[in-house]
Image (cartoon, helix red, strand yellow):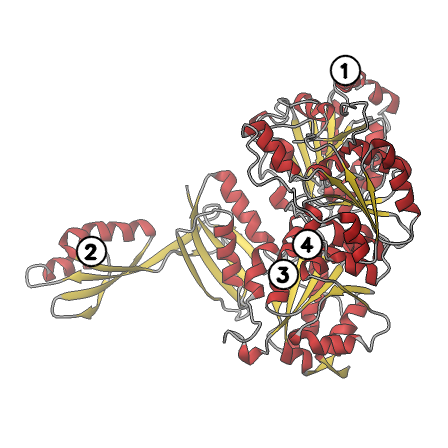
Amino acid sequence: MSQLTGAQAIVSCLLEEGVTTIFGYPGGAVIDLYDELMNSEKLEHILVRHEQAAVHAADGYARVTGKVGVALLTSGPGATNGVTGIATAYMDSIPVVILTGQVPTPLIGNDAFQEVDIVGITRPCTKHNYLVGSKDELVQTLREAFHVARTGRPGPVLVDLPKNIINGLITYEPPQPIKMDSYQPNTEPHPGQIGKACRMIMEARKPVLYVGGGVILANGHEELAELATKLDIPVTMTLMGLGAFPGNHPLSMGMLGMHGTYTANMAVAKCDLLISVGARFDDRVTGNLESFAPHAKIIHIDIDPTSISKNVHVDVPIVADCKRGLEAMNTWFNNQQDISVAQEKGKHQQWFDKIKTWSDAHPLGYIDDNDSSIKPQYVVEMLDKLTGGDAIITTEVGQHQMWAAQFYKFKLPRHFLTSGGLGTMGYGLPAAIGAKIAMPEKTVIDVAGDGSIQMNIQELATARQYNTAVKIAILNNKYLGMVRQWQELFYDKRYASTGMDVAPDFVELAKAYGAVGLRAKTKDEVVPVIKEALATDNTVVMDFNIIREEGVFPMVPAGKANTEMLLV
Amino acid sequence: MKHTLSVLLQNKPGVLSRVTGLFSGRGFNIESLCVAETIDPTVSRLTLVTSGDESIIEQITKQLHKLIDVIKVMDTSEGVYVEREMVLIRMKADAQTRAEVLRIIDIFRGKVVDVGQKSYAVEVTGSASKIQAVIDILRPIGIKEIVRTGTVAISRAGMSK
């Protein structure tokens, strides 16, 4: 037990939680905490250029490491600027703790300078949040915040820190196990439900594994691979699930949903058993609900009971950590001595033959015009090839995001960082910086569009300040391409406000920030540009001048059945 | 269908707005809501009447459980509960109607809590349907104002889940 200032106690709590890096932006309400950070050699602070980027960077850091990311923002506008980052992390279940400064407690509610009710504002977009009302609550609140962020279905937790509490003297007690009466997430699957699900899998002739980000969050990819290969079950992944199962594995059918593969969408439509693991039947995945997996019994493993039977009725619900649920299934099958594995595998042969007819008929692809123009898909294919498919890829939101998801064959979990739920343009660059800082030895590439990249372009300065050699591949079509594609298909080609004819010269802009800028105007320049970028030990912006009106296909029009795909 | 949910919560600032924010943010209905401290001052009980089909009620229950400060959620239609609501009604009460108002209130085991020159304020307690019945009967005589508490519920002896 010792007397510390609030700021010292906060730093001690962060170190106790194993935090080594925080992303933030200073201001009056947190100036004392920043002063204390200067005394700590163990905590590295990354100064971003906009608070939204601090939260995205902490989010990117969390996604690649599995640890809790930490962002530190000042009160008022500092906190409100962070809201988009917080909502992004919330929708994708990413463990982040956001510390915000607040005006001193006697001033709260007085419309003080840089005062905002950030706890009220972020209530619907955090897993939980706290206003530290007295100095006695400070340490316990911080410990709870980390516990809540990382356990159960992970998510962002905000702690609002009034200035007088950061400054006050408190009694610091060493950590004790966290006990919260009203928060005890269940991680262990019910054995009866596991048995029921496994018997259903045995009876199925046309099963499909439908895998979401929950498997990655739970580190359950090995257990998933064991189950899929043991029983020969084809796998499709959501956008958030990419990397949970190797994209180049023969059992992988790729992504499903609005821009999923023909094979995956047909297989889900025709399967007799859908085994959903850590996915939430999002509207971008299901299309028209009536015609989603209409012939299938559904098993659903998820840590969050609210995700089960929310949009689609589930026959066998299993509330559990995805890793534990998959493990229990594998154990169940391993214990069935009378099951011949070879026999099990043979049962799906007709199903595989059917799947092959779909993938032969409409493989994922694009039309190569055989001229010098650059197809965006070709750029992603070359990124995949030249990085050996094991770079960390972040994206912004739009067409480039879908091309990255379709044409980069993710082999490993925690290698694809994208705003799947909220769909936040401006996510990719700061997330890439967070990822690169966490994993300096990895190649980190932000696949971006010319629209999205401008939403947080200022973070080039952050990347430069910390010698963060992230690579940015702009698929530049001078359009807000995804909206333009919808306008082309459904709005009679009326391109309302989607032309981006005026944009900075990205090569010169990169140079202005002290980064390297490269441009490819023709197809034969693509590979040399990527090679040069990968060989350069600096932040590199690659400007690929792609053909302007390429579309993302397959595409399921909003509200249609997944079998009603528009194909290439 | 109407459901009465009885919810135990941590008695902390902002908890009520977490619950009401959940309902408004997800488009669920609140028909009435009552909240006060329990015998344990660190815990509050919130009694809430909502409506929806089975899947909506299931989703509401799960979403409430998911709030970090929610300790327990009980659906009173699943157990054996006593439900009560109180209403205060200000009635027009002149020479012609006073006796009639008193008779009706007596039938419903209510009482007069305030008397004025031209009005009575009366109090009636009972199930939501009894409250509705007394309002329907008093309405033709002349109701000036109604204040209802919303439903509260308690499990019957030996029946608590």
Q: Distance from label 1 to label 2 (Cα)?
A: 77 Å
Q: Amino acid at mark 3?
A: Asn
Q: Are marks 4 and 3 in contact (CB under 8 Å)?
A: no
Q: Amino acid at mark 4?
A: Gly
- Classify residue A312 as left or right of residue A393: left
Query: Closer to the N terminus: mark 3 or mark 1?
Result: 3
Q: Amino acid at mark 2?
A: Ile
Q: What's the mark number on residue A357? A: 1
Of labels 3 and 1, the one closer to you:
3
Query: Closer to the N terminus: mark 1 or mark 4?
Result: 4
Secondary element under disc 1, as helix, strand or loop, is helix
Q: Residue furthest right?
A: A535
Q: Position of residue B91 (x, y in %)?
A: 18, 61
The residue beneath circle 3 is A81
Q: Position of residue A452 (x, y in %)?
A: 68, 46
Please give the chain letter of the residue carrying mark 3. A
Q: Are marks 1 and 4 in contact (CB under 8 Å)?
A: no
Of labels 2 and 4, the one closer to you:
4
> The C terminus of chain A lies in which quarter of the figure?
top right
Q: Residues within 10 Å of mark 1 (few under 14, many from 20)?
A: few
Q: Position of residue B93 (x, y in %)?
A: 12, 62
Q: Distance from label 3 to label 1 (Cα)?
A: 50 Å
* Residue A198 vertical placement versus A184 (above, below): above
Q: Distance from label 2 to label 3 (Cα)?
A: 61 Å
The residue beneath circle 4 is A155
Of labels 2 and 3, the one closer to you:
3
Q: Position of residue A368 (x, y in %)?
A: 79, 24
Place residue A563 in its image quadrant: top right
Residue B1 visible, this angle: yes
The residue beneath circle 2 is B107
